[in-house]
Image (cartoon, rainbow, N blue to C red):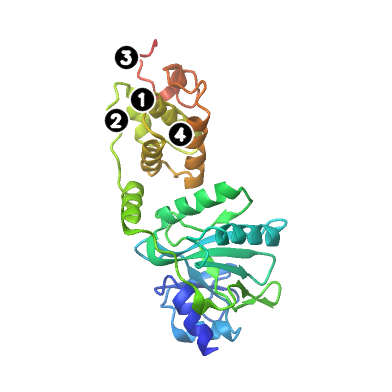
Amino acid sequence: MANQLQLLKTHFVSNTDWFAVTTPSSLTTSTAPIARVPQPLTDHILQLHLEHVENVHTYLKNQQNLVKLIVVDFDQTNASNHAYEFLQYLLDHSEFDQSCILESTGGRGYHTMIELAKPIPCNYANHVAQQLVEEIGIPCEILASSPHASYGHTIQLPWGLNRRYHQESKIIYPTNLDKLRPFKFPDNVFEIAKTLLTKKLDPPVSTKPCIEHLWLGVEHGSRDIAAFTLTRYYWSLGLPLDQTMVLLKTWNNKNKPPLQLDVINRKVRTIYHNPHGSRFCCKSITGNPLLKQHCDPKCPLNRL
């Protein structure tokens, strides 16, 4: 069990500033199914988890919005088959074959994970996971939190007792965690990607007041169509997909509330991969009841 304690700390605990527990628990009076405990995650707490006294969950991101695990969650129909399929996909790619983990959660779910050699921004982790999942096309949930979420996703730590199913969660692959070799992004690739995904790009100068208005952000109910419209506008200007993606993610931070990053990814890729009929025109704004409020009636271009 001493070895398991060290393995938890080495491979799975990302945030020691706080943690969560399955309730009921002696560590909280909360009645929420999973409750945050605002105190440090110590060896003693981890030991209680391994002894099945408490069921402890770790937060995937730390206070700097960095994660050291990319986690893909499978709990739908055929979860086992999909988790193994994704694991095999990773094993078939030499860059990941020594850094992936498959865990049974002790219930109906599975986690396929990639351990990272050094923590990376959580939005970049989400982007990497999204690319991998799109490649294989299987139903799952990516547990890579937005930097705008207060605490983000948790995962139940391995070797704990699933309170609902009364089974211990366990590591299926690899059989020896000591042989893991966490994935290391090449430094130059990491820095380029980190810059692209964290900096706030200024949008191209627009002569259209409607675009300037949309850039300030929109509210729930018009976010989807606004995302499509801005993407069409930037595509019409000839911007490459990766730059439009960064612009849309910067714009998305201004929305109330922001869209999920995977939604932004899908919308941008939809326009760029199926561009027929995507060119922006003023009717893109005036012809839509959700957006026409952004049209300036004095705009000399609104007849185009």
Crowding around mark 4 (Cα neighbors within 10 Å: few <14, some 14 to 19, many 20+) is many
**Quarter of the image holding residue 203?**
top left
- Assign a secondary structure to mark 3: loop
Give the camera-side residue of 90 and 248: 90
Which sits earlier in the primary sequence, circle 3 or circle 4? 4
Indicate the position of residue 270 as horizontal and vertical percent values: 52, 33
The CA span between labels 4 and 1 is 16 Å
Q: Position of residue 234 (x, y in %)?
A: 38, 29
Q: Nearer the viewer, mark 4 or mark 1?
A: 1
Tell me the residue that label 3 is attached to: 298
Q: Position of residue 128 (x, y in %)?
A: 46, 53
Residue at left offset 45%, top offset 68%: 182
Q: Amino acid at mark 4?
A: Ala
| The quadrant where residue 17 appears | bottom left
Mark 2 lies on residue: 204
Q: Is residue 158 above or below residue 76?
A: below
